[in-house]
Image: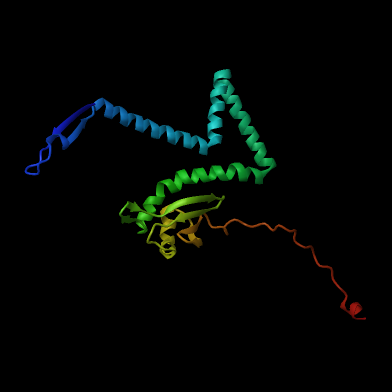
Amino acid sequence: MKVVRRYEVGIGDGREPSLIYRERIFVPLWVTLLGRAAKGAGVVITRLVWWMIRHPVQVAAVLLVLVVRHAAGWLGVLAVLMLVLGCGLAWRRRWPFSYERHIGARARRWWRWRRVYSRRWAETMDGCGLVESGTRGVVLPQITRLQSFPDRDLVTVRLPAGQVPSDVAGACEAISHGLLAWRVSMAGTWPGRVALLVQWRDPLTAPISPELPMPGPVPSVDREAANR
């Protein structure tokens, strides 16, 4: 690092030349590159740590695979995967509601987010006219929560400044075509947020079995004997 001082003398004001000066600091190129590399590495490490905190199950699974691979090789990893798959199938068969809550719903939410919303949401919002340009760049409704069910999703959306729920309600048909869904409708509104019900298939196409047994034949009653 090199410091160069350049003196400036006031004309006609009687000031001393040594009291007024300007400093220029020259930083070597390698120092600048090293600082940028350190900043980039810090950002990557921070994001990696934050992802590990938010996904402890995935981190534990990767660590388990590494430990088993080191101890028993790839055959051991294959044996563990088969054991986990068998336990999952038994869990789903014996306790279907518990499996759906802890495994099925989360896997379905991750799959639909990767395959549908992360790929089509921004383009669909642009096609529906819900993308606006502001002082901070291009803004659009953002998904803040996703709840997935076998035949539908409940999507909570945060509206950008200047948009109202009626703007999204008027674009529901276009959103359904953009997401390739059977139907999209409004499910609720809050200040600055809306909830969309995304249905992937017609719920009335599959037959609905009654939960209670149907009553048997009604025995005949002798009305004349009953009136006596």
Q: Position of residue 223 (x, y in %)?
A: 87, 78
Quadrant assignment for the C terminus: bottom right
Above or below residue 28? Residue 199 is: below
Above or below residue 84? Residue 150 is: below
Residue at left offset 53%, top offset 24%: 66
The reply, left or right, for residue 132 in relation to residue 209 is: left
The reply, left or right, for residue 43 in relation to residue 82 is: left
Quadrant assignment for the N terminus: top left
Residue at left offset 55%, top offset 35%: 56
Q: Residue furthest front?
A: 14
Q: Residue furthest bottom?
A: 228
Residue at left offset 63%, top offset 29%: 83
Quick one: 156 or 200, which is closer to the camera? 156
Q: How many marks?
A: 0
Quick one: 169 or 87, which is closer to the camera? 169
Image-quadrant location for residue 23? top left
Q: Position of residue 184 (x, y in %)?
A: 48, 59
Above or below residue 159? Residue 220 is: below
Q: Position of residue 219 (x, y in %)?
A: 84, 68
Q: Position of residue 24 (x, y in %)?
A: 19, 33
Quick one: 182 or 133, which is closer to the camera? 133
Residue at left offset 47%, top offset 46%: 113
Q: Residue furthest left?
A: 12
